[in-house]
Image (cartoon, rainbow, N blue to C red):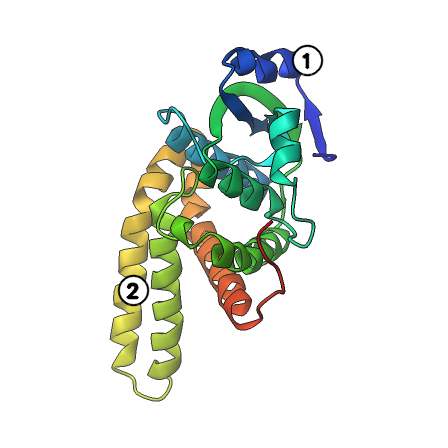
């Protein structure tokens, strides 16, 4: 992507997997040295997803920030659907994977990036990702249940935050609902524990705020996805 700076060996490491003649596409990773707490959280968030990708021999999810495709495969697929924003790279990789194209993860192909460094910027980005994710799920409903990149905990957390918000609003009218809200929040903290524990080993300051930022993520994605379900974009597969 235009906001990324490749490491010196990026091209060599990104193209190395293409020694496999059957390989159609390859995904690399982000690095960041930003001092802001939110940006450091975002980097660990990506690293959590990279840990999910590493053991998988093939993947179905390539982000363009560090990516390569065989030109003939890309052209034959019709390329990116430019009517989709934020997640047009996801839609392309889902489409390629559905067509049987082999995609892989290359954790040594690194690009430096400036992540969102404030809660407002982070929440805004997640909202729009959620919105456009709802649109491409209409094209690829088989990826709703699972994809190679997205931890299942994110979907659980989105559901818990939605229930927490709904029961909190209901509690303003009927106080017993507040007990349900507390229960939802307790379950949320349980689902946040694995990420928080991983963050503790990398950056203890981030670990301390991780549950709160995971709530921001789940809420923003949830509202974005809900809005995307209501406001359907006119898009279609290629």
State the image quarter where residue 149 is shown: top left
1 w.r.t. 110: above or below: below
Horizontal and vertical percent position of residue 95: 52, 42
Identify the image quadrant of residue 215. Answer: bottom left
Q: Image quadrant for the N terminus?
A: top right
Determine which of the numbered discs, if any, sits on residue 206 in the image: none
* Furthest residue in direction bottom, as rendered: 173
Q: Earlier in the sequence, mark 1 or mark 2?
A: 1
Q: Residue at x 42, y 55 (%)?
A: 141
Instruction: Count all numbered tags in the image, as a single digit.
Output: 2
Residue 8's label in the rendered image is 1
Where disc 1 sits, the SS reads loop
Label drawn at residue 184: 2
- Distance from Cα at disc 1 to Cα at disc 2: 47 Å
Residue at left offset 30%, top offset 76%: 178
Q: In the visual, does 60 lie left or right of 182?
A: right
* Residue 80 x, y percent position in the rendering: 65, 43
Residue 121 visible in the shown view:
yes
């Amino acid at each position: 992507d235009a906001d990324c700076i490749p490491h010196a060996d990026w091209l060599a490491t990104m193209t190395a997997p293409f020694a496999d003649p059957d390989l159609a596409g390859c995904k690399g990773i982000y690095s960041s040295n930003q001092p802001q707490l939110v940006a450091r959280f975002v980097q660990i968030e990506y690293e959590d997803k990279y840990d999910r990708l590493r053991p998988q021999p093939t993947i179905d999810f390539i982000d363009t920030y560090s990516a390569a495709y065989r030109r003939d495969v890309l052209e034959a697929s019709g390329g990116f659907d430019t009517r989709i924003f934020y997640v047009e790279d996801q839609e392309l990789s889902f489409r390629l994977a559905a067509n049987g194209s082999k995609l892989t993860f290359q954790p040594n192909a690194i690009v430096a990036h400036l992540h969102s460094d404030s809660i407002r910027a982070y929440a805004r980005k997640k909202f729009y990702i959620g919105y456009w994710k709802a649109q491409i799920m209409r094209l690829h409903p088989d990826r709703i249940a699972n994809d190679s990149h997205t931890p299942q905990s994110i979907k659980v957390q989105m559901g818990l935050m939605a229930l927490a918000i709904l029961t909190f609003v209901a509690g303003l009218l009927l106080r017993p609902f507040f007990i349900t809200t507390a229960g939802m929040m307790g379950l949320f903290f349980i689902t946040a524990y694995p990420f928080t524990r991983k963050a503790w080993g990398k950056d203890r300051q981030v670990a301390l705020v991780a549950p709160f930022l995971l709530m921001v993520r789940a809420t923003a994605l949830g509202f974005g996805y809900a809005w995307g379900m209501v406001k359907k974009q006119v898009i279609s597969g290629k």
